[in-house]
Amino acid sequence: MSLKLTILGCHSAVPTVNKQQTAQLLNVNERFFLIDCGENTQVQLRKYQLSFQRIHHVFISHLHGDHYYGLIGLITSMHLLGRKKELYIYAHAPLKDIINTQLSAAKIDLNFPLFFHVIPDDDQVILYDDEDIEVTNVILDHSISCSGFLFREKKYQRRIIKEKIEEYKVPYDRISDLRNGIDFINEEDEIIANDILTNSNVKARTYAYCSDTRFCLDIIPKIKNVDVLYHEATYSHDLKARAFERGHSTAKDAATIAKEANVNRLIIGHYSKRYLDLNILLSESREIFSNTFLAHEGDILDFDLI
Amino acid sequence: MSLKLTILGCHSAVPTVNKQQTAQLLNVNERFFLIDCGENTQVQLRKYQLSFQRIHHVFISHLHGDHYYGLIGLITSMHLLGRKKELYIYAHAPLKDIINTQLSAAKIDLNFPLFFHVIPDDDQVILYDDEDIEVTNVILDHSISCSGFLFREKKYQRRIIKEKIEEYKVPYDRISDLRNGIDFINEEDEIIANDILTNSNVKARTYAYCSDTRFCLDIIPKIKNVDVLYHEATYSHDLKARAFERGHSTAKDAATIAKEANVNRLIIGHYSKRYLDLNILLSESREIFSNTFLAHEGDILDFDLI
């Protein structure tokens, strides 16, 4: 199963020409899961050639504008471009009225079904699952109800051996079969055994998204041992008091959570606009958790390559 | 009095990387009036270095998203950046709830007063006036309640003679006094009579904004003889039936209105994305009304120079 994360925006609060607000796209075997949707996300999707008609599930962490003001525009464009397939939105309760009131004002009767699923404020539940993946909410500690999301693969799939794929000239459209243990038959009708081309027992991958939140030890059991943790790091630690007051974390906070949760890799983002040089945040985090990376707009993280 | 129009966006329906939705800024003596506010308008204002804290009045023509989805983000950013001065919004009735519901969901208690003025559906009234300018609504014929806006200067000011300004080395900060009839005193304490530097009896200027609308003869008496008319021209005339069905105009429609209303200059915009070459629309309009121009993002129209 392929698993790729694209950063569509990673800045906080007020957008500028070069600072796009939070949005991420998780590609699970070519099915798209949108995580947060700051203003202008639909244009960011176009910029990175990610067809938004392939998004079927949208997860909104909380109802601050830098995380959802782009959603109504995305839904409207899906409608105008003729979408028929259903769209599922997972968010806190008020979003349903916000969206429906705007559609009603425009007299838009959507030509696709739109389903809202309310994220509980006080309970961690399975929001979504199918044969490939399960998504649960993670209760965060912000100034309003806020939820992180944990994506967990359900299958133990085989991992591709790149060199062998090239050596045996396996076409791209056979890769998925290989991951599911199927042998490869080449153009000469020779059978190439699957275990020549793949490794066995690759563990199911996990991705945890945690924005926005104060330093919150309670999330550690929930995100323990994940492959990749995105954790907000709005401020550097000299502004710890401001971070706490505003319901945010510092880079040191994010790194401490990553270390205590024993994650493999930490990505930080949701930067305050005060940081012209984001390496301040990166170096602060790496002092505690060395495998930290900065989120940048346009970054693509392929879970097969980490 | 200076009067300048900046086009922040001039495309319809679905935004793309290079196609910003409708928004315009009218600068009346350095006081900013925002006309419509498509998604991402706050970033467009930054791009063209137009401080959005100087916007005091926002006019929203109708509640289709390509004309207002950027407003909630703009208001939120004004708040986050510490605005204290009041903001006045002129729009159809449902917008008040749409904005307030979103502010409430985010628990934002604005640190500036926000006043809503409802544009009447069936009556043309003075929406705003002060000593410099008067704004009235123009009832348009669209698929939902939709209003154009007519901006009319109230003062008859003197017009600057550019060559004389250069000849007498008049500094920029004296220009406003000259327009109001005051003589210029140079560094040698010589008095330069105002009528050497300006022409008299410049008529008050007018700007009419008409988007979105079907071809609508009823608007002609309202916009008669304006200096500049912005009129939507979503389609070329071979798609007249589609234009009518969707509540829009063709370039020929816009030109006919401009001609019948005897305006000085016509600007067309709100282009359908089907037109890769906008000259199709321009030439169609110019066949009927030669003084037609295409709106382009970033265009600045100085009413002193037309």
Image (cartoon, coloured by chain):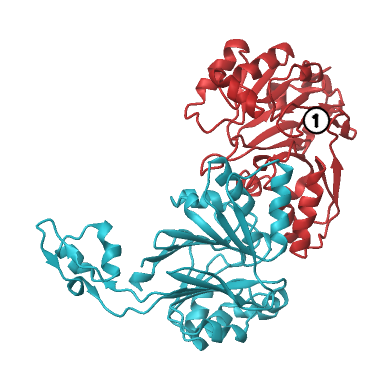
Chain colours: A cyan, B red
Residue B273 in the image: state x and y as whole percent.
Answer: 52, 33
Residue B127 image offset from top left, x and y in percent: 87, 34
**Label 1, on which residue?**
B1
Residue at 70 percent of width and 72 percent of height: A145
**Does residue A86 sit above or below B182 in this rendering?**
below
Dot 1 surroundings within 10 Å: few (below 14), some, or many (20 or more)? many
State which chain disc 1 sits on: B
Residue flagged by tag 1: what amino acid is it?
Met
Q: Secondary structure at mark 1?
A: loop
Q: Position of residue B279 (x, y in %)?
A: 51, 22
Locate the N terminus of chain A and report the quarter of the image it occupies.
Answer: bottom left
Residue B253 position, x and y percent, is 64, 17
Q: Is residue B281 above or below residue A298?
A: above
Residue B245 is left or right of residue A178, and the answer is: right
Q: Is residue B191 visible?
A: no
Q: Quadrant of the C terminus of chain A?
A: bottom left
Q: Nearer the viewer, residue B67 or B195?
A: B67
Can I make out residue B232 in this image? yes
